[in-house]
Image (cartoon, rainbow, N blue to C red):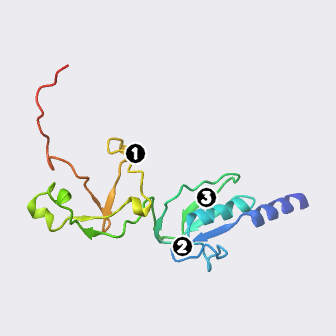
Amino acid sequence: IIAAILFFATATIAAAQIYVSPEGNDAATGSETAPFASLARAARAAEETPGPDTIWCRAGLYIITDPISISGAEGILIKAFGDEKPCFRGSTPITGWKRATGSAILAKVSPAARKRLVVADLARQGITDYGNPINENNRPVLYCNGEEQMLARYPNEGFITAGRALG
């Protein structure tokens, strides 16, 4: 009986409750009152503690820019805290939008769109992998004010006939 009590007491003590919140701080303790800011930091904390851990995610938007790997840990459960709704996005916010001024760029769009055309330097923001527009799982996606934008294409609707296929 004593062995069973010690086993269950040890299992209960070993299980960690780790908290993460977009308003948290990765230098914090990961407690409910001092949560981590990133899921990556919470995952590292879970790796450092023995036993099954639960990472509680508070409501808010989590921007994930690097892969999160959990190795050397077993039984980690990642859950929303209570009825809260955390949102995870694997994306990079694009900043530095400016009105397009180059005549070569402006010549490619209709006169009506020229006044509204904006551009941003992605390479300057560290974005060099543009994915593959043909691969459904690796397409570049642009969100503006929370809405997915359509990639530029021609024609904007329907299809264009190119002629007879030869071969």
Indicate the amino acid at tag 3.
Leu
Front: mark 3 or 1: 1
Closer to the chain start, of discs 1 and 2, is: 2
Q: Which residue is mark 1?
A: 137
- Tell me the element at label 3: strand
Q: Pointer 1 and pointer 2: residues touching (CB < 8 Å)?
A: no
**Is 79 in front, or is 92?**
92
Using residue 22 as the reference point, say whether residue 34 is left or right of it. right
Instruction: Name the mark on residue 77.
Output: 3
Closer to the chain start, of discs 3 and 2, is: 2
Residue lying at the far front of the rendered structure: 103
Mark 1 surroundings within 10 Å by alpha-carbon count, few (fewer than 14), some (14 through 19), many (20 or more): few
- Tell me the element at label 1: helix
Instruction: Find residue 101 and report its horizontal and vertical position in percent.
Output: 20, 66
Tell me the distance, in whole angstroms, between the alpha carbons under discs 1 and 2: 28 Å
Residue 102 falls in image quadrant: bottom left
Tell me the distance, in whole angstroms, between the alpha carbons under discs 3 and 1: 25 Å
Front: mark 1 or 2: 1
